[in-house]
Amino acid sequence: MRLSQYFLPLLRENPSEAQIVSHRLMLRAGMIRQAAAGIYSWLPLGFRVLKKVEQIVREEQNAAGAQEMLMPTLQPAELWRESGRYEDYGKEMLRIRDRHERDMLYGPTNEELVTDILRNTIKSYRDLPKNLYHIQWKFRDEVRPRFGVMRGREFLMKDAYSFDLNKEGAIVSYFKMFSAYMKTFKRLGLVPIPVRAETGPIGGDLSHEFHIQAETGESELFFDSDVQLLDEASIDPASPQVQSYLGQWYAATDEKHDPAEFEARVPEPRRRKARGIEVGQVFYFGTKYSAPMGATVAGPDGTQVPVEMGSYGIGVSRLVGAIIEASHDDAGIIWPASVAPFKVGLVNLRAADAKCTAAADALYRTLAQAGIEVLYDDREESPGAKFAAMDLIGLPWQLVIGPRGLAAGTVELKERAGGARQELSPEAAVNRLEGSA
RNA sequence: CGGAGUGUAGCUCAGCCUGGUAGAGCACCGCUUUCGGGAGGCGGGGGCCGGAGGUUCAAAUCCUCUCACUCCGACCA
């Protein structure tokens, strides 16, 4: 993509409404624009990142055996009256009335809707287990939206729902998702901290939140630092010991925190108290929805039993902000390779110079043909402005072509993280980029 | 929902106290000299001063109402 043609409105100064670094950088890097409090448009650069995050989440859900579907944003109030949550949810839920005076709502979550689908289709225990998910926009009418996409009112969430015949099966489904979440967050370049959590309005008795450590996090965490070394491959969802296995690392939100237990179980050097951004939560809640809504199947003995359920959320749009909180410096964003909007920024230092531009154009074509995502700064701007723009948008690599290198037959390849630079031939630079992750 | 602020050019802000017909820097457009980490010169375009009402000869400025946004708290994924 040529920067001269790309819609990328960069801001040199910090917009006054943005208080935290991810919000500031997303606005300055031309990723988002605010439409109303807690409601954002995603501009081309931000949209590319959002789609990459979404795709990694999707791949790991599919790999864990969940099946993608798509439920609507608008739901009938009737289903929520069945579960009892229509009144419980309060003003967080955006209620809408259609032209026929029917009560509707913009879904804050989808337990009711998916349970309705299941009860109308699945009749036998032979059809279980099932795990269905979708990636859809949600709306929660927060009293006080803030921090950009980290706490928006409208947000993109992946939510999965598992259905099992009994509790043992549901626990297996739960830990399959647990393991998939660990892998997902690691692929996004993050270090997830899974903590025991309250179940909140979703209900149930088993829940974990997944947090990313950041000073701007809204949650307070207490954990054994070794939990950060947890390898998801060591989690066997089918093992009866999986809960005690994971329980060996103390990790809790402040609501669940027990100072006495923390001190007794975790040696002092490994005790951590830190702020975290919640990027995912998993719940096992049994028959909380299936029982009142009549989602039952015929068991092996022919009796009708309510299905055992769990739900599993990942804040896809919030993750974009969380990744920036976890990976930036004074100059701008530092994208992990897996979600970077482009792999490399190609900088033509002398767009007004025919030789320099010819060399840059040639390299641009070569990179594009090699299937490398490249953002080509072909504008006539000062070098300082170009470097600042590239550092701000934080692509993993920068490839610089200027008269100095041209005379020596080299280009400069710079790594955004760490800032290491090297002069090498254009061919060698392309090879390096092709070979890197 | 309580408390505190802010709304003036695309962005950051000054002007408001003490009313007199709208400003700066950056950004943008043209020309030019430049340009290896946000470069200089000259010229230019861009504003229902958030909205409505009021006071006044005269309102960005004073008064009333209203809307939006931000921050702290409570609440929340």
Image: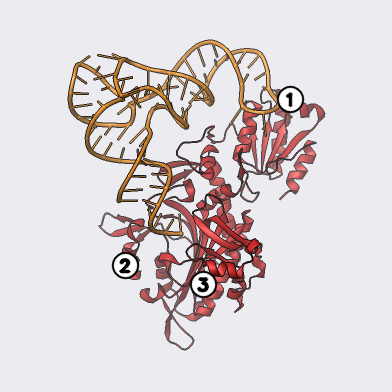
What residue lies at 46% left-to-right and 52% top-to-bottom? A155
- Identified by mark 3, the residue type is Lys
Image quarter of the N terminus of chain A: top right
Residue B60 x/y as whole percent? 31, 25
**C-alpha span from label 2 to label 3:** 25 Å
Pointers 2 and 3 in contact (CB under 8 A)? no
| Same chain, labels 2 and 3 | yes
Task: Check disc 2 and give the amino acid type.
Answer: Arg
A172 vs A277: above or below: below
The answer to whether any part of residue A80 appears in the image is yes
Specify few, some or many for label 2: CA neighbours under 10 Å numbering under 14, 14-19, or 20 or more. some
Foreground tag (2 vs 1): 2
Q: Is mark 3 on a helix, strand or loop?
A: strand
* In the depicted structure, whether residue A98 falls above or below residue A251: above
Specify the subunit that label 1 lies on: A
Disc number placed over residue A130 in the picture, else none: 3
Q: Do the residues labelled 2 and 1 touch (CB within 8 Å)?
A: no
Residue linked to disc 1 = A355
- In the picture of the structure, the residue carrying the numbered disc 2 is A81
Q: Which chain does red denote in the image?
A: A
Q: How far apart are marks 3 and 1 (CA)?
A: 61 Å
Mark pair 2, 1: CA separation: 70 Å
Q: Are marks 2 and 1 on the same chain?
A: yes
Rendered view: A31 above or below A294: above
Per the rendering, the colour in which chain B appears is orange
The correct choice, above or below, for A307 with respect to A17 in the image is below
Q: What element carries label 1?
A: helix
Locate residue A400: give its quadrant. Answer: top right
Give the mark nearest the N terminus, 3 or 1. 3
In x, y percent, where is residue A437?
71, 50
